């Protein structure tokens, strides 16, 4: 989604552990051009909409909508847990979905976290990495932003095969819901813009390195997930 990768990486770069990452960038010229394209679209279209959204939507409802989208995105997470044979994590995420959908009124309230069922995000890019496709070149996608070739392959699988969106009719309702999710995520990231302005000398390099470091961390944790759970 436009602008999400750049600002999202600001969060994850501050939270991830220090680790050597492969920053080979054979598509650098294309990636930089696409990065600028995405930034301009974000500046002209998405950021103003997200800013207005934060102004007119009360904070409790804003958080409730964010929780709702986290909840429906649990479906592809559970599917990828299964594909990766992480059955303990699948049970955790399934319980989160059930509890938040019922007690949490469709996911508006994150009751599962209050019951110590921690939020976890999984995707088909991590599934491909789990089964051997770990090294992949950095690639900036139009509209979606920072990615790799592997993660780009995973996007349509997560959306068309594993998510709820293709089953929502009429189609205008599907696209409206998806669009609201994009605005919600962009609105959540407005708060980190001052951080990005302070730490990023070259925004492209910052976004690339932060994305790759975050994915390296996720892949490493995902590979050892069963071992970590078994030892707890």
Image (spheres, rainbow, N blue to C red):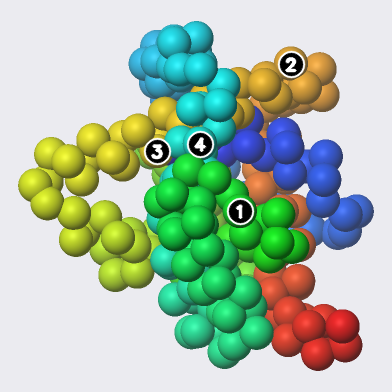
How far across and down, in percent of the image, does residue 1 sit? 43, 37
Q: Earlier in the sequence, mark 4 or mark 1?
A: 4
Label 3 Cα neighbours within 10 Å, binned few <14 / some 14-19 / many ≥20: some
Nearer to us of marks 1 and 2 is: 1
93 left or right of 222? left
Q: Earlier in the sequence, mark 2 or mark 4?
A: 4
Nearer to us of marks 3 and 2 is: 3
Residue 116 placement: quadrant: bottom right
Gap in Å between the C-alphas at discs 3 and 2?
23 Å
Look at the picture and state if 134 lies above or below 171. Answer: below
Q: Residue furthest right?
A: 18
Front position in the image: 100 or 19: 100
Gap in Å between the C-alphas at discs 4 and 3?
12 Å
Look at the picture and state if 26 lies above or below 180. Answer: below
Nearer to us of marks 4 and 3 is: 4
Gap in Å between the C-alphas at discs 4 and 1?
11 Å
Residue 81 placement: quadrant: bottom right
Q: Which mark is residue 111?
A: 1
Gap in Å between the C-alphas at discs 1 and 3?
20 Å
Q: Which mark is residue 64?
A: 4
Front position in the image: 199 or 164: 164
Q: Which mark is residue 181?
A: 3
How far across and down, in percent of the image, does residue 14 sit? 83, 39
């Amino acid at each position: 989604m436009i602008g999400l990768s750049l600002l999202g990486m600001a969060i994850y770069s501050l939270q991830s552990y220090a680790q050597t990452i492969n920053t080979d960038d054979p598509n650098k010229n294309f990636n930089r051009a696409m990065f600028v394209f995405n930034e301009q679209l974000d500046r002209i279209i998405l950021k103003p909409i997200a800013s207005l959204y934060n102004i007119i939507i009360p904070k409790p409802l804003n958080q409730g909508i964010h929780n709702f989208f986290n909840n429906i995105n649990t479906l592809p997470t559970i599917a990828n847990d299964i594909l990766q044979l992480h059955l303990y994590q699948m049970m955790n995420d399934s319980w989160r979905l059930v509890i938040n959908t019922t007690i949490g009124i469709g996911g508006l309230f994150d009751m599962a976290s209050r019951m110590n069922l921690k939020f976890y995000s999984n995707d088909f890019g991590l599934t491909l990495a789990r089964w051997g496709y770990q090294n992949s070149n950095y690639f900036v996608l139009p509209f979606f932003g920072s990615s790799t070739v592997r993660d780009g392959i995973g996007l349509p699988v997560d959306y068309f095969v594993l998510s709820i969106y293709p089953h929502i009719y009429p189609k205008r309702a599907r696209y409206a819901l998806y669009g609201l999710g994009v605005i919600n995520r962009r609105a959540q990231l407005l708060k980190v813009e001052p951080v990005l302005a302070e730490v990023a000398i070259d925004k492209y390099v910052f976004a690339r390195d932060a994305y790759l470091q975050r994915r390296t961390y996720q892949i490493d944790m995902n590979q050892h997930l069963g071992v970590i759970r078994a030892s707890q």
